[in-house]
Amino acid sequence: MLLPQLCINPISALSSAMDTTLVIGDSRRIEDFRSRTAQFSSSFHLIENDEIIPDLQDFKLVFDLCLDEYPARLAHYAPQAHLLVIGGAVRRSLAEMAAAIDMPLQCRLAGINALPTFLKKKDWELSVWKEELKEAVTDRLKAWEIGCHFVADRVGMVTPRIVAMIINEACFTVQEGTASVAGIDQAMRLGVNYPGGPFEWADQIGPRHIYEVLLRMAEDSGDSRYKIAPYLKHRQLKAENFRETQ
């Protein structure tokens, strides 16, 4: 059975079988991954979401940067006991995705905050299906000169949750007419020494991603704190950045 956005080619094999890392994602996240790991790029096999990929037996490690957008893919990885899978786990927790496929999870599974821009950072934010995986994940990233910190396996993880809430509050402020997009960005840079304002962040990450993180957090928790500002919803529906429309 072929699942959405992932086609397996059982014939194709890599010359460096079992030594290559498979990286799957959209063009933005693949580029972020490449920019952070450029000096090790010879060991990566990069595939965009809708491309045919080699047999999973050719790999020991898979980064599926969009796993939380296409959680059915986990059914492909689950029976592969030799695989360490590090998948996007912001919109959905690892536990939620594993429960949804309704089959034994034989692969080793970890989650990553792979939203656009976050993979460019010095340290990556991760979660794990089982605590004993932390050492294996840490050792692998250390070999690529990447630091990591682990958070609980929760929808929104930690950093995306905080950033999304800051951006959402800024949207409510603009919507109420209290301040402009440019004014809020400048106030946050000058007043609290942020490297960028909330709308600069939102445009870099993408309003759609911010909206979907808040939506999933609201569904998961039922907490009114995650109520989405209509101004944010309007921007993502029109696929518009905030600063371009000022």
Image: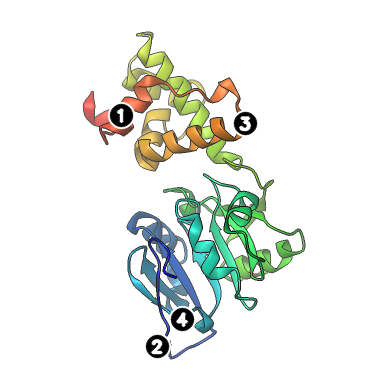
Q: Which residue is mark 2?
A: 11
Q: Most extreme residue toward the right, as rendered?
A: 132
Query: Along the polypeptide, which appears first: circle 1 or circle 3?
Result: 3
Mark 1 surroundings within 10 Å by alpha-carbon count, few (fewer than 14), some (14 through 19), many (20 or more): some
Q: Which residue is mark 4?
A: 55
Q: Is residue 29 above or below residue 22?
A: above
Work out which quarter of the rendered image holds the N terminus and state it.
bottom left
Task: Please give the label number shown on residue 49.
Answer: none
- Looking at the rendered structure, the kind of residue marked 1 is Arg
The quadrant where residue 144 appears:
bottom right
Q: Most extreme residue toward the left, as rendered?
A: 245
Going 22% across and 27% down the picture, which residue do you hit? 245
Query: Along the polypeptide, which appears first: circle 4 or circle 2?
Result: 2
Q: Which residue is mark 1?
A: 235
SS state under label 2? loop
Which x, y percent locates residue 127? 65, 53
What whole-number distance in Å separates the C-alpha atoms at marks 4 and 1? 40 Å
Closer to viewer: mark 1 or mark 3 = 3
Mark 4 touching mark 2, by CB under 8 A?
yes
Task: Please give the label number shown on residue 221.
Answer: 3
What whole-number distance in Å separates the C-alpha atoms at marks 4 and 2? 7 Å
- Looking at the rendered structure, the kind of residue marked 2 is Ile
